[in-house]
Amino acid sequence: MRIDNIIFYIMMGIECLLLIPFTLNYRLLDKTGKWAYYYLVSSVVYAVGAAALARLFKNNLWFSSFMDVAQFVILSVYYYKIIKNNFVRPLIKFLPIPALIFFFVDFFKLEGVAAYTSIFGTIRTFLLLCYGMIFFAQLLFDEELVKESVFINSLPNFWFNAGLFIYLSCSFLDFLTYNFFLKLSLGDATIPALVFVSGILESILFYIGLLKAKKLRV
Amino acid sequence: MNIVEIVIIGTAVMLMLGILVVVLVIFQQKQVIQHKLALRDKDLELQRERLVAVLQGQEQERKRIAEDLHDEVGAQLSVLKLNLGQLSQHLKTGNGEAERLKETKEFTDTIIQHLRFISQSLHPQALDNLGLSHALDSFCSLMNKNKQVEIAFKTSGNGHLVDREKALNVYRVVQELMNNILKHAQASEVLITYHSTPSLLSIDVEDNGNGRLLDSLDQSRRKTGSLGLKNIESRLNIIGGSINFAKRTPTGTVAQIRVENYQPAIG
């Protein structure tokens, strides 16, 4: 078994395990935390579904493309709820619509049904990275937090965003070059391995976020 | 270097950058908060120093007035009393002048006693000469002479010296508490218990009043203009002490004053 496959199964196992404490403590999560939980559920579905389809049909790219859209919608709602900026919020609300249109164009016309929607995936990742940066900036310049001496590492949303940010940063180039490498048959285990490592990091940071949410509620 | 290697390096760099951004965000915000906390601490320290200066000025002024009253007005009244005594010896007529003179002498005595009480309240000489325990005892005796409330003083383990500044502040706190009890508690008995160990000074002020002292203190804590309780808290804050109010069974209130490390610094 290739190294990237081993790391993928480790990541999938961690995500499945992480679902247990998240589900048990679902009531402790606030509205935004619940959307982070939905994202986690979608990640498990993504990982398990992709693995199953790869074994059954030898092609799971269409599934990956659709899961990317689903996760983009979930994360757009999540960022819409945590970002306070009045200029950015309507943009986050509006952007999933053109993104969805672009996804269908990419899926049916540009890349094709049998390929991965690389262009949509890259744009989606870029947008989510921007949202993540905006949220970090919001936390950094939040006068209320400074006034109340609240350290941002005590906030669950900081950890959820940190996990997402690390994963999205690492997977950006992978999404960009995925179809290109597929067409040229330049398969390499290192890039997906790195992406799955960042996925494991994301899961750990999500767990820290859950611990912080519990601490805040108790 | 081929394109795959470039993308691998790029992905690794992006991963590192992602982690770096998260770490930097944490540290940057931590630094901002720590800076603000340091500024707030400095501000609090400045406010504390100002408060200490104000209270010290107030004490000096009280001391000066107390000395003036005791040394000048008190002395003059004593002379007046002596003169009245001499006059009564020379008085020969029996038309009631002797009684009038006796009344005047008694009245002078009352004024002298009041003057002593005021002078003692303004600045307790016993505190400088005999220490906190004796000063509180003397304060109770003085209060007993002037008020309807019976005040008892109990002491144990009072062999430990109390730092002068701390003693004065504790004395003022007990004084303020007594004022509050006389004003609001409608008590007939008050017990002041003084206890000291080498590391802790404890003074309990118990009254058998209506227990409303606790409510009135709670209300005044919320009010902005309540000086009595603020005074108590400020003074204890300066000397690192604390106060706790509790309901006393069957009736009344207990105020527990605690001061740690109260002994004067050596050297």
Image (tube, rainbow, N blue to C red):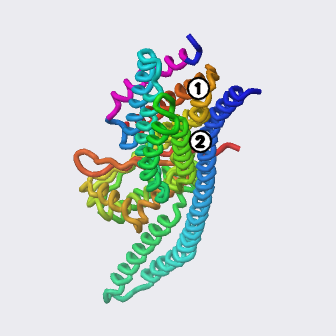
Give the residue at mark 2: B26
Which residues make up the magenta segment?
A5-26
Measure the C-alpha gap from mark 1 to mark 2: 38 Å
Residue A67 percent coordinates (x, y): 43, 32
Does the magenta-highlighted stretch encompass residue B233? no
Image: B168 above or below A208: below
Check the picture and name the quadrant holding the C terminus of chain B: top right
| Residue at position x 64%, y 41% in the image | B24
Observer-side mark, 1 or 2, equals 1
Q: Circles 1 and 2: CB distance less than 8 Å?
A: no
Residue at the front extreme? A109
Neighbours of disc 1 within 10 Å: few (<14), some (14-19), many (20+):
few
| Residue at position x 44%, y 29% in the image | A62
Give the residue at mark 1: A182
What subunit carries mark 1?
A
Could you tell me the amino acid type at mark 2?
Ile
Residue at the right extreme? B1
Could you tell me the amino acid type at mark 1?
Leu
Residue B82 percent coordinates (x, y): 49, 77
Instruction: Inspect this view and state whether residue A91 appears.
Output: yes
| Residue at position x 54%, y 43% in the image | A123
Instruction: Inspect this view and state whether residue B135 appears.
Output: no
Helix, strand or loop at mark 1:
helix
